[in-house]
Amino acid sequence: MAAISMPDFYMPWPARLNPHLETARAHSLLWVRETGMLEPVWDEERFAAMDFALFAAWTHPDASPDELCLMSDWYVWGWYVDDYFPQAYTEAEQLGAAKQYLFRLLDFMPTDGTATGLTPENPLERGLADLWARTVPGKSEPWLRRYVAVVQDMAEEALRELFNLARGGDRVLDPIEYLELRRSVGGILWSAQLLEHALGLELPERLLDGRPLGLLNAAFADSQGLQNDIISYRIDLAEGKVNNGVTVVEHFQGCDTGRAVGIVNDLVTDRLQQFEHTAATELPGAFEELLLTPGERADVLRYVQGLKDWMAGNLEWALRPGGRYLPTDSGSGPAAPSFLGPTGLGTAAARLGLGREALGLRVRSYLNAPRQTREQLELPEFYMPWEARTHGELETARAHNKDFVRRTGILDTPGLGIWDEALVESGDFALCCAMAHPDVPLEQLDLLNDWYTWGFIQDDYFLEVYKRPRDLPGAKAYVDRLSLFVPVHPFAVMPPPTNPSEQGLAELWQRTAPAVSDELRVKLAQSTVVHLRTCLWEVFNAVQNRTPELIDYLAMRRDSIASGVCADLLNHVSGVAVPETVLASRPMRRVVTAMGDWAGWFNDVVSYRMEIEYEDDMNNGVHALRRFTGGDLPETVTAVNDLLTARLREFEHLTDTELPALYDELGLGADDRDATADYIGQLQDWMSGFHAWHLRTGRYTDFPVRTTLPARLLRGPSAPPPVPSVLLPAPSGLGTAAARPGVST
């Protein structure tokens, strides 16, 4: 089989080799013989060629001899799992046995210091029992629980891969679904946690759930997984595997292998540049905000350097001819193989990010001049398999909605002019809710209607007061204070509202919190705060004039569209009792994720002209994809529409295939199955109504067309006030009565 042409991989950090390599090699061979971890997967010749000790030596250049041997053994164990399971479990009837096998492994990893009492019965169990005994000493119970959770996540995603393979194996995932799978199943996040052990540190717990560290780990995992997909493509193709990033792009784009490799490599570069950007711009702020001690900061910086060492060493090991992925170099001598790219004076620029592709991606991120001219955008034909219906109490909901808008005070914002009566009529927010929830009781319809309207109010208020002026300190104070209006305790005392956003949220929480369970109240409060904090990310991008990196935008868009808030509210008003085991399952979580992805990117297409031409906002999926590809607007919109279709197809696949398999596994009765089907139907209603409202509302069409730079964009947070509106050119023509400052969902 002919090898693909390898691209120039971007790698800005040098690789270093641990001096204790030979010690690790000798130990590694002895260890696999003792545990029996060769047959039936490998023989000694193949094992020596893959040289996992060399991998550990490249990725942990400063580890002590004992620690290097431990890292090497963990990697051997992980790759043995990766190679063994696709051979041992190939039929649908074997999935139960595979699950039992995998989850028995977790029993060999107690986190409380107790003995397991289990006798290892196979090489994987013998290896794990030995590894765990060598890993536990000196580590805290929270760290051990985190480690086990990562291993469990790997096991569950491995089972999903087996599920797809057992049902034919020819279903190619869409790019978003594949990225989610790849991040977990490749063992790279597991390697990041092993790195903490190798460095002799534990990351501060209060940093673990924050964006900077999560983004560093995600960028690390994505870049290394996708890079591996390019290097291992030849082997995966020979083995008939479709879970490979190059194959996914070939299928989704309908392009040849060379083009797919180029796209995947650009994603690798983009993720590595995001890693650099996050470490330089977001991590220092987190240090200050969380008041990390000097020792904690030093540990985090050591960890970041360890990730860099790991990535540089991984590339060196993976590109080694005759190793795990690439054929033996047929030439004689140590000459560099052709797939390493150009050699000679000046060619280091490619890996350092000075090559045309890598430099182009970085530069395009900051080319965000306010739009001077209009671009024609023709909406494509969107795939929507469900018929939209409208609630019978629409007119009653409209009247109620107007009263709520008045109570928030958004119509009375002196000097801002954010909303007026014409805008409320044009937006028709009650129609959005009536189409998204056509069957709920009127009281619930009014509550949902007000929640959705508050989301639009908050978005528009934030845009005018903080995002346009690029006022990041003010935005942070605003979000921190607004979070006080969603207390977990239902009768907590809130501060007095001082603006329309606070007034609206205070009323909503007083109406919602007492009516929901304690668990749902906590979830809804958390979802609301997570949504609000995406506003800070948007201002942070605006301050830098930086278009978000594509995969980072994908993750943040789920929160900025408030998909978590919508899902929690739907759970409250659905009127059906879906078993908690179903709601918490991975298939159902992916259903909600697919819905959120579709909603966010669909909104980005419909609102593109308003956001780009009027709001001068770079936080838009069409814009982010266009920045990545360098393509024109029509072809970018076509690509986004293909992604929307793929997300809805994934929703259908999950509800038609994976959820029924889950019901069988859980032994659900008819009532529980009917309740879950009802809930899925309400999710479908939500999407069909959201789709229909976007194509009917004037929110995204009745806006003035800017031909000059907005006054608010020219002033900073401490600059003089804007020019009075009477001195600015006013829009004219049909529909301009509804003109108002920028809006985005």
Image (cartoon, grey):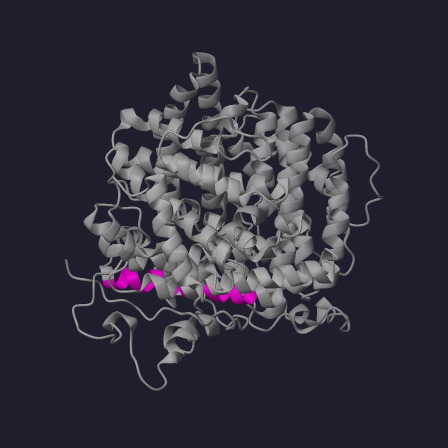
Q: Which quadrant of the view contains residue 349?
A: bottom left
User: Residue at the spot x=54%, y=49% of the render?
Assistant: 698
Q: How many marks?
A: 0
Q: Which residue lies most toward the top here?
A: 670
In the depicted structure, whether residue 579 falls above or below residue 299: above
Please report the bounds of the magenta region as a residue range.
Answer: 258-277
Q: Is residue 438 magenta?
A: no
Q: Nearer the viewer, residue 95 or 433?
A: 95
Residue 381 in percent (x, y) is at: 35, 47
Residue 428 visible somewhere in the drawing: no
Residue 213 shows in the view: yes
Q: Which quadrant, please, contains the N terminus? A: bottom left
Q: Residue furthest left?
A: 1
Residue closer to the observer: 530 or 441: 530
> Would you say residue 269 sits in the magenta stretch?
yes
Quadrant of the rendered structure where residue 234 is? bottom left
Q: Position of residue 290 (x, y in %)?
A: 72, 55
Q: Position of residue 20 (x, y in %)?
A: 44, 63
In the rendered image, residue 85, in percent from the top left (x then y), is placed at 31, 37
Q: Is residue 393 above or below residue 259?
A: above
27 vs 123, nearest the viewer: 27
Residue visible at 73% across and 72% down in the picture: 723
Above or below, 578 against 547 in this view is above
Q: Main secondary structure of the magenta part?
A: helix
